[in-house]
Amino acid sequence: MFLRKLQDIRKSDRNVKSKGWESARLLLKDDAMGFSFHVTTMYAGEELHMHYQNHLEAVLVLKGTGTIEDLGDGVTHQLAPGVMYALNAHDKHIVRPETDILCACVFNPPVTGKEVHDESGAYPADPEREPALAD
């Protein structure tokens, strides 16, 4: 067993910032849990184009509001506290936070820690990656 405090992670190199978001990565690949776990803030007024081609992700909104657009079918869904969305088919999507959105996120396979979105909106594949469950 190990224990980590969010406030400590936010002060460490496990806290990754990029345009429009910040992610405190509490569990990473090296923790050998089979998934990574992040507490992420997506900032109000941003338009975050994402397409996790190499990962599956589940997100639980804890605070804030906005929308997520599924670019596969063009449907837009409201995001609010208590709403969970799962990108179970490597779904290409856009998140548009109306307020800052605080959320808890799980990635499979786990990220290594320094990933930021590439030009396609994906995190790069880990060359030593284990296949995601839906691959």
Image (cartoon, helix red, strand yellow):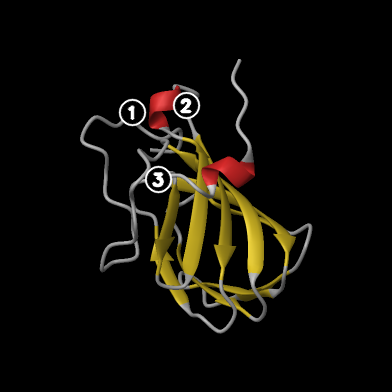
Relative image position of residue 73 (x, y in whole percent): 51, 72
- Which quarter of the rendering shows the N terminus? top right
**Image mark for residue 13:** 3
Which comes before the other along the chain, label 2 or label 1? 2
In front of the other: 96 or 16: 16
**Image mark for residue 34:** 2
Residue at mark 2 to residue at mark 1: CA–CA distance: 9 Å
Q: Residues within 10 Å of mark 2 (few under 14, many from 20)?
A: some
60 relative to 36 in the view: left or right:
right
Which comes before the other along the chain, label 3 or label 1? 3
Name the residue beneath numbered marker 1.
130
Q: Residue at x 46, y 69 (%)?
A: 72
Seen from this angle, which residue lies furthest right?
82
Tell me the amino acid under the disc marked 3.
Asp
Q: Residue at x 74, y 59 (%)?
A: 83
Count of numbered circles in the view: 3
Relative image position of residue 28 (x, y in whole percent): 44, 34
Tell me the quarter of the picture where residue 79 sits.
bottom right
Q: Residues within 10 Å of mark 1 (few under 14, many from 20)?
A: few
Residue at mark 3 to residue at mark 2: CA–CA distance: 21 Å
Whether the residues at callouts 2 and 1 have beta carbons within 8 Å, the answer is: yes
**Label 3 vs label 1, nearer the camera:** 3
Q: The residue tagged with tag 3: helix, strand or loop?
A: loop
**Label 2 vs label 1, nearer the camera:** 2
Tell me the amino acid under the disc marked 2.
Gly
Please say if 131 is above or below 15: above
Residue at mark 3 to residue at mark 1: CA–CA distance: 24 Å
Q: Residue at x 27, y 62 (%)?
A: 118
**Label 3 vs label 2, nearer the camera:** 3
Please say if 14 is above or below 84: above
Whether the residues at callouts 3 and 2 have beta carbons within 8 Å, the answer is: no
Tell me the amino acid under the disc marked 1.
Glu
